[in-house]
Every structure is written in C-alpha cells, then in structure tokens.
Image (cartoon, coloured by chain):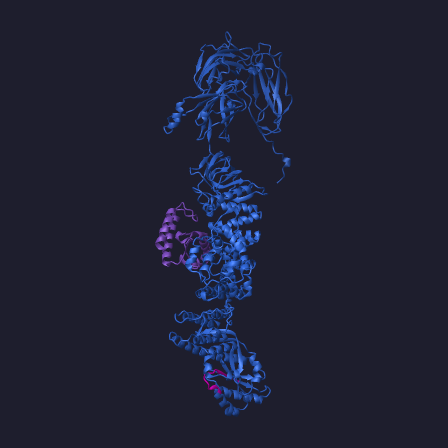
Chain colours: A blue, B purple
Amino acid sequence: MANYLAQFQTIKSSCDRVVIAVEDVSDLWLNVRQSFEQRLPVKKACLNNKARNPVFVENLPAEFIQTTDSRLRSRFPQEQYLFWFREPYATVVLVTCEDLDEFKTILKPRLKLIVQNDEREWFIVFVSKAHPGNDQATKMAKKVYARLETDFNTKRRERCCKFDLHGTDADFWDDFDSKMVDCIRNTLDRRVQFYEEENRKLSEQRFTPIWNFCNFFILKESLAFMFEVTNLHEDSLREYDELELCYSESVNLPGKHREFGGLDTGDDQAALLNPGFKALTQIIQDDVFREFEFRQYIFACQAKLLFKLSRPVEVAARGYAFVVGFSKTLALHENALPFCFREVWVITACLGLIKSTSAQYDNGIVAIDSEKEFHRLQGDLYSLCRVKFMRLAYLIGYGVEIEKSPVNSASLSMLSWPKPATWPSIPPDSSAEIMTKEKITLQAKPREKLFNIQRKPLPLEPSFLLREANRRRAFLSVGNMSELYDSVDGSGLDAHSKLPSNKSSSNLMIRTMSGPATSETSLPVDRPMRLSEIHVAAEHALKQTISDPDFMTSLSSPEEFENRYMELTKGAADNYHRSWWKRHGVVLDGEIAAIFFKHGNYDLAAKSYEKVCALYSAEGWEELLADVLPDLAECQKILNDEAGYLASCVKLLSLESSLFSSKERQAFQSEVVRLAHSEMKHPVPLDVSSLITFAGNPAPPLELCDGDPGTLSVAVWSGFPDDIALESLSLRLSASSSADEGLKAIKSSDARVLVPGRNIITFAIPPQKPGSYVLGALTGQIGKLSFRSHGFSQDGPVDTDEFMSFEKPTRPVLKVRKPRALVDITPAVSSALLMNELQWIGLIVKPIDYSLKGGILHIDAGAELKIEESQMIEIESYRSNGEQSGPTDASKALSSSSEPGRVEKVPIENGKIKLPDWASDVTTLVWFPVRAIDDTIARGTSPASPLKHSIVDGMRMIALKLEFGAFHNQVFERTIAVHFTNPFHVSTRVVDKCNDGTLLLQVILHSEVKATLHVKDVSLDLQAGFEHLGNGDGRPTSSLFPLVIAPSSRAGILFVIRLSGTKDLDELENSDSMMTIKYGISGDRTTGAHSPVPVKPDDSEELLFKISLKLKRPVLDPCLAVGFLPFSTDCLRVGQLVNMKWRVERLKDLDEASLPDDEILYQVDANPQNWMVAGRKCGHISFSKAQGSRIEIAVTCVPLVSGYVHPPQLGLPDVGEANVSCNPAGPHLVCVLPPTLSTSYCIPA
Amino acid sequence: MECMMCEILYLEKEDQAYQHQFILHAALDVVQDLAWTTNAMSLKSVDRFNELVVSVYVTAGHTRFMLLHDTRTEDGIKSFFQEVHELYIKIFLNPLYLPGSRITSSHFDTKVRALARKYL
C-alpha cells in the first residue's frame, strides 16, 4: 500500500475542492454551465463534523465536473475507495423533456438506471426550455416536471428541482443550493464513517507485525484532507494531532533501527511551516517515515490549518513546544548529524516561526490575554534563538563579543556543548585564519570595570571548550586529555595561557612566532588542538552545516554577528515587554545596553541600564544590582552625568557591604567625595536613605517645655567605608500628629565627620510648637551633594532595605509640652503699707517644676511709686505653712531646712534683679524697698464732713517681668497691686459744748495698718476762728504719751478749744486746722506696714504724720433770721408770675460794727434756665438796727420749666453764714406745673 | 513586592550565585501570571531552566517563596514550603519584624536548613 503514497501525494495536490458530478442526460450542460458555476464556491453550507454535530462552513470550494470527464472516468474501483475523498460528493442530473410520453418511455428508465447506484448522492434538475410566452410549452413542461416529481421524490427527500432556462427565479437557486449541500453532507458523512471504520480496523492491528504506519497515514491523512477540503479545519487538525500522537508512539517503539533523516542538503533549515518541503515518498523508508522530516511535515500541516483557523498564537505556542521537544530529539541523534546541526535547526525554526506567526498575527482583534501570550511566545522564541546563536558564535570564537552577564551565563553555561561523533578537525590551509582568530583572542581584553571591580567573569560555557573539543576527537583518549587539563580552572578564553608549558612568556612566543602556521596544520594528529584552532575548525564545519547563505553571513564576522545578536535580543526584549514580562524584558534591555556601551553609544546604554537597575533595586535583588550598577555608573561617568553618576556611586555604597570588597567600597567613597567637591554647576539632591540611617536614642524622648530650646542627640549610622567629612548635617523633625515635614531643619553643630558605623550627633533644637515629634529626615551636604535620608534604623545599620524608608518610626524623640505656668509671682503681703515711707514689698517667686536659673526680674514701678535703687534687694528662701507641714515633700523640706532663712542681698539696676543660682529651684521671697508718693495732705473727717475714702487712692501698681529659661526665652509677666495707706485715719467730733463757749473736741485716731503704732506726740494747729484754751501750745489736755494703738483699733484725744472772733469769716471758710502726729511703728514686713527702711543710718525711728482737719464753727448766736413766706398761689405754673417773699428779722444787736450802716445787702440766686427774675436781683435794703425789726424782700419770678426745681435763694453776702439762721428754712424744691393749654389751638369738635 | 528566597546552599555553586538569582528573578514573571489563576498556594514548578526547576509557593499576602532546585519530589517540596510558611508566619507575628524587610533571625535560618535537610 505504500506504493500508493506517490499517487496519494499527486492526488492530494491536484484535488483541493469538492467535486460535484454533472450527469448531463439531455445535453444541457453547456447551456446552464455558466449560471451553475456562478454559484460556486458554495456560500454557506451546514455540514456535520466528525462528532456528527452540525457545523456551518462558508465558501466551500467546489467544482462541477461532467461524468463524461476523463478525470472521473478512468478510475479503478479499488482506487476509488482508497482515495474516496476525491470522488464526487454529489451528482446533478440535468434533464429536460417536453413530452409526457417521451418521459415515460425514454427518460424515466434512463434516469432510474442512473440513480440506482446507491452510493451516489444525486438530485435532478429539470431544465425547462419553454419560453415564458409560450403557454403550451410551459404547461407541458409543468406536467412533465410534476410527473418527474412524483416518480423521483420520496416522502423523506425531495430530489427534484426545476430550472427555467428563460427567466430563472431566485427560489430555484436556494433550492438548488440546499439540495447540493444535502448531497455533500450525506456523502461526507458516509465517507467519514467509512474512513473511521478503516482507521479503527487498522488501529486494532497496530501491535501486529503486519501493521504498516504508511497505510495508516494514508487513511488518516485522507480523512484529514477531506475535512480540510470541506473547510472542517478543526476536524482536520484533530486528525493530524492523532496522527502525530500515533507516530510518536510508533517511532519510539523499540525494535528495528530507523534512519532519523536530516542529512540532506538544506535540512538544517527547519521546514516547520512548509509541508511541501519534501515529497513524502522521499522520506519513507521501509514503510516508515523518517522522523526528522515527518515530524516537521506533520507540524507544518497543523500550522497550515491553524493559520486557516486564524490562530497564530496557537501556532507559536505549539511551535515553541515543538522546537524545544524536537531539539531534544535532535540531541539524541546528534552524533549522526552534521556539526551543530541542532543549533542551526533551532535557530532557523525559531526565526521561521517568528516570521510567519507575526505575519499572520492581527493584533487588532484579540483579547489582551492572548496578546500577552502571543508576545510572550515570540519573546521565548527570540530568546531561544538568541541563545543558540550565541552558542554558535562562541564556538567560532566570538565569545569575547558576548557580555558575560548573568543572563548569558545562565543560558550558556547550562547548555551542553554540541556532541558530534568527532569534533571537526582543522581544515588544511587554515593557518592564516587561525592566526587571525588568535589575534582576536589576544587583543580582546576583558573590559576593565570602573572602580577596579574585580570579578571572576561568569562562565559562558558548560565545560571548557578546549577540553570538550579535544576529548571528542577520535584519536585522543579521554584520560589523556583530562590529565592534560586538570590544572586548568580559568574560562575557556584564557585557558590556553595555562597550557602545559607554564611559562607564559615563552608560551606567548610560541603562539606568535612559531604559531600554528607551520607545525600544527601538518601534524594535527598528535597534538591537542588549541582554542583558536578549535574555533577555525568549528567555523569550517559550520559552513558545511549551514545551507542558508544569509545565516552564514551573520556568523562571518564579529560585526555581522553583533548585528544579528542585537536584532534577536531586541526582538526578545520588545516582545517580553509587550507581554508584560517586564523582568525578562528588562534583563534583555541590559544586554542591549551592553552592546550600546561597547560601541560607545553611552546615551542609549545608560538609559537601558537605568531601567535594569531600577527593576533590580525596586525588587531588592542586590546581587544582580551589584552586577549592573557599575556599568551604569561608568556610562554616566562618560556622559558627564554628574548627578546620575553620583547617585549611582551612592547606590553602590548603600548596597550590602558583602557584595563589594572594602577596597572597592573605598573607591566608591573617594569617587563620591571627589565628585561632590568638584565643580558641579548645581547642587545635586540625593536620597541616601539606605546609606545613612539614623535613629533616636533608646532613652525616653526628650521633654521640653513650650518655648524652650533643647539638645537632641541622634544616632547616625554611616554606611561609608571610611570617615566622611560633611559640610553640614541637619535634621528635620516632623510632628507625629501631622504628616508634613514643614518644620525647619535643625543644623548640627557637631564635628562633621562621620565615622563608619554609629555616630552620635547632637542637635540644638530651637523652641518648637507643643506636640510630640518624630525624626523626619536627615539632610546634609558633602560638597555640592546635598543628601537626604529617610532611613530609620531600629537598632543598627543592618536594615537597609528599601521598604524601611517608607516606614516612619513611631517612637517620638521629642515632646514639647503644652504651654503652662512655669512660675508664679504673688505679693507676699496683702495688707496696706505706709504711704510716703520707704517700705519693703515682698514678692513670692515660686518656680513650678522649672528652673529659674539665670532669671532676671524686671520691676517697673508705676506712677507715684518709686523704687529705692540705692538699697539692696533682699532675697530669702520662702516656705509657706503648707510646705512646711507637707510630709510628701520630704526632700525639699530637707533641702530648704538645710539653709534656713537664707538671705542674700543683691543690687538692683535699672529695675532689674538677677536671681541668684540657689534660688532657681526653690520658692523665694524677694523684698525690695519702695516709696509710694502721695503729695496730698490727708484730711480728717468729722460728722459734718463724712469720710470720702476710696481704696483706689492707696493703690500702686508694680509691673513685673521675669525672664528665665536657658536663653531667657521664657517670660512671665504680671502686674500686681500694692496697697498703701496713711498710718491713721483721723475723725473729730465735738464732745461737749460748754456754757462758756468752750468746746471739747475729740480727735479719734484709727489705726489703718496691721502694726502697732506708738503715738509720741500730737499737736493741733487750729485754724482761724478757733483757739486753744489755756496755754495754747496745741497739745491735748491729757498727756498720755506715748500712746500705743494696736492694729485696727482706735484712740481718742481730747482738745479744749473755743471760738475766736467772727471777723474773718471768709478766711475761716478756707483754712484748715492742721494736726501733727509724731509716732513710731513696730510692724513686721511679712504682715504689712512696718517701720520704714532706713535710708541713712542715723535716721530716727520717729515718724511724722500730718493731717488737716476742717473744723466748722457752730452757729451759736445768730443775729439775723431769714424766713421764706409761702406762695400766694396754690400752684406754680410755667409762665405765670409768682411773688417770692422772704422775711428778714434782726434777732439781736450786733455789738461789733460788722454792718457799717443800717443797710443790708441781699442777693437772689436763681438758675436762669429755670427762672426768670423780674426786678432787682440784688440790692441794698434799709434795715434798722433795733432788735426785732423786720423787713420783707419780694422778688417776682416766672418759672420757665415745669417739674421740681430749686426755687431762687436769698443770700445775704455781708453777713457770715454762721450768723444767719434760716427759720423756717426755705423749701428745697418747688413743684412747677406745665402751662395751661391754649384754646386758640383747639379745634371745635 | 515581597519575595523571599530560600537559598539552600548545597544547591549553589559559588560562581553560579548570579545565575541562580537571575533565574529566580526571571521566574517572577511567570509567577505573576500564575498566581492569580489558582487558589492553591503551592504553584509547583513554574519555570524550568535547563535542568533547574523553580518551585514557587505564594502565601495569601503574596509573599513568594521560591526554590531553585534540580529534580526532586514534588511532595517533599510542598511539605518544605508549608513548613517554611509556618516559620515565616511566626516571624511575621514578631512585632519587631517589619514586613518586607530581610529576615535576620538565625533561628529561622537554622530551621529552614533543617527543613531542607529533611525534605529536599
């Protein structure tokens, strides 16, 4: 059956559509052909798939072929079954007839004959030639068609349709299509069934010896092909999948050795997507296909179907898996295949897949997930291709071009070497090439990294190429080689420098001078190959393997290699980025950067490196970061990107210290310092959170009072390997209640050198707002570098993770208390002090849990108060009664009792007192002398002139201001009132009036102070009109002195006086009597008034107090009496005249000629606003001197306002008041009624 | 982004440290896709790099335990991860431990090593 393979192949290629046979009974085909073929391909068809489910397919390709056609005739029945898929799927019987008889006799039997073959699906198209105008013919045709229908239609199926040659109607075509599709569907079902049956039969025989895969394949693929032709791609794909499965099972069966394939020219180019790459007949051998070709073929068929199903993503997915899997299969057969065949095949396969899938891929319509998936697969393909390409390049000596990065190392060092049966040997006449290779190898120097970072280069090879290549040469025994190279431990590149002849200098000589040119090429057998020779040999072998010239060019020179390498890397990186596999993408970006870097394209390199570094550092992969960061730094250095370079250096320093040697770290630091102090244009801000960390002291937070500065010590850990000098270092505190760090930075005044590890830095903190504060940020400057650190360390510099910087320490380092009273100053004495004398004022200065050290008390005495600055201020410790008895404060009591009553005298200057140090923590009493000045003379009181005493008179204000705190930043201000008073209050009264005109005047002294007063002497200097009786020295009658007056008590002193002449009445009114009291005072300043401070030492204790007393002459002998006569009218009214009358009567004769004549002056006083006085207000009136004579004085007045008003008063200015008796007294107020209503204004009702 | 690597030292040759880190790091791409597709914490082996396999265990808080190993029994790895998870939770309960920071506890280290000896 395998013989049919070739035939199968040709049939398959020639037949790509559904065939519909046309049985042209009545020679009509030519007439209808055109219109029939216009219906193709079948627009819509509903077919059954393998699982008998209806599937709608579109554009089903089909072809009408006449049964008379040679293609359908010349077939053997045997073939027909085998290649049944090409047989017609439907038969259209074209008939026409215009006569019933003819139909009965000729056509019907013939048709019966045609349709009796059950295996064919048929339907009849009756073509009516009748012209629509020809009724007869039309009727006839209808009749015949009706007959036809009854004869050939069954109940289950209608097989006839009528086609009008002239004027077809649309219904016919629908009918036609559906009948055709019915036929195709039925045929398809039957054939599928047939093939399945056959397949089943064959599968049952699978493990019998007669089983033949080739037959199975033909059957299976026929089915698949049939599905494919009928557009049932899914089913077709499934068939291929089954076929593949079956094949891999059969090929892996142990048993006879089969050829693998892959030895033909061009086989190195993967034919993954080209099913027609090789004819199947070429790859068959003993009824079995060669694996190499066949698996590619199957995959190609699958890929073709998947593309038809527009599933390029699946092609890529399956393709990647296939390449990986097939690569393993190739590895199994590697020793039979050309050198590096596997690598070359994988590369071409990947490139082919990438090309075709991306061409087919329409990214506009797919879901995001499948888009990601697609790009990921593309990326995978690219990177697989890239790795294999690098491997090839390495083999031919381009290893120096390949960056020894972790990614390359990981991919290459775990990828085994190709394992050819024998390693290719050096081609003849290649000495020149060897020389060139050698030169390249020698010239290539490992790139010196910045900062002299010495790292063992990562390997790019699984084992040393030198050893591997030589081991695989047939003529060298393995043992021999391993002995030779056991000492070799470098990478393959520098392995040749450690060849058995250990002297490197002589070695070099051999290599360059006597070299490979002469001896080795002629004698390749005995000597192990050198590396350059291996490279040349590999290159030659590769040239043999690779059939694609384009591919070979990309390996022809390092430049070409680099171009292709770049292309692959970029492709992989781009696709990974688009698939959101950023890590894969970014890592490859790093590789791209390495190439840019090599070509001096530092700009682009830096950009890519930055991406890589950002990724690693964000994710905390420090070792990987340590690998890339120096490269970035170097780029930045070359680009003169000082800021970036500085940042990179700092970042390098802040990496884990174990990643770099101390020497390297020192190099970083010196670079940082150099840069920072170089001439950078702008200061560079930099976050060094992981390099410099800080923390508050573990002790409880520093507590400050509001407004107080303080010093805060902070532990700063420096991650620098050496001491580093800072220009400045400042700390920001942030209030724990609010997130912002709006506070001003606090500069440190400490020495600005940070030693590695822990440093204690103290910061002087200016007054802060109340609240609690946590450490915010540490900022500082190294040259032009202004750094900023948020890194808080808990207890050591170990935690340098990035995460740390986002965590704020919760422990406050500073607490500033809410403002409160820190000190209290109260006056010590509340009772009054002596006026006009120098008195001590006591102030109790009481610190409230706060030291008043260095405090200055400003005393500003107010008006009428003077501080005697010549006097010293006395300060003594003060203990209130409560404190003394308080057992709770034992220590304080003890300390204060240790210096009982300590008194210190301090001077006062400009109202300022400096508080002594000992007084800073204890309550003290400050005494200072003041003098309240009151120039007015005190007045005594009498019943006639009662006391008009206001307490305000004796008040004096003292403004106090206490500046204290470390920087005198705390201020306490208070104004206190001090009460001053005279020692006595004096009141007088006449105790008795004797018949002889003498008066007993009692003077009562009230003590006004809380001190005992000793009255030593009193003298009364009487005013005019009075005189002392007797000796007249002004002393009181009794001599009791000294008189002691206890506090708040009073004492009385009697004086005997009498009235003297009444002449100077005016004078008498104005003058006062003056009393002078000499007294002493014995009081305690702690309770109140006390004896004045002696200004001069010889000041006597005797005090003098003067007080004026107003004595009023009693009206003892009136000589005139004035009486007010009642009004003539009952009521006074505004505007009405009224007569006011006074009667003056002489009571006795005035013996003195006080009145010059018998005329008397009178005067009427009236408020002009209330009264209008008609007539004379004043004048003389004659008045006889005889006792009892009377006169009347009348004045006419008009009241001007209504209400109670003072009436006019009559005064007699010539006569002293004391001589006039008002009897009866005039009215005090009179009632004045409003004026009567004026009728002229009244309107009659 | 939290990631925890159990660097089991006997799997590491010194000069391969970078490579291994790189392989683990690259596997994070896969983990990121896979973690959301399953409810299970143990993602089994997510990535394969030549003969090296990356097994991953993702905790509920998306902390990832990644183990780079050559072929080993899956059960052992699963139990290993589960026990490491338990240890990790204990570390986590420590109020002084800052989530995401490096685990410096030597006790943890010894325990993990002991687990590795037991299961791997």
Tell me: residue B39, above or below residue A833.
Answer: below
Which image quadrant: the C terminus of chain A?
A: top right
Position of residue A1021 measured from the top left corner of the image (x, y, whole percent): 53, 12
Q: Nearer the viewer, residue A220 or A478?
A: A478
Q: Quadrant of residue A1181?
A: top right
Position of residue A9 measured from the top left corner of the image (x, y, whole percent): 49, 76
Tell me: residue A189, above or below residue A438.
Answer: below
Which image quadrant: the N terminus of chain A?
A: bottom left
Q: Is residue A33 magenta?
A: no
Q: Nearer the viewer, residue A672 or B42?
A: A672
Q: Nearer the viewer, residue A659 or A360?
A: A659
Tell me: residue A617, above or below residue A301.
Answer: above
Asked whether residue A41 appears in the rendered view, the answer is yes
Q: Quadrant of residue A1145?
A: top right
Q: Quadrant of residue A1160?
A: top right
Outermost residue toward the left? Answer: B118
Q: Which residues are magenta?
A: A114-125
Asked whether residue A395 appears in the rendered view, the answer is no
Position of residue A1167 measured from the top left corner of the image (x, y, whole percent): 61, 25
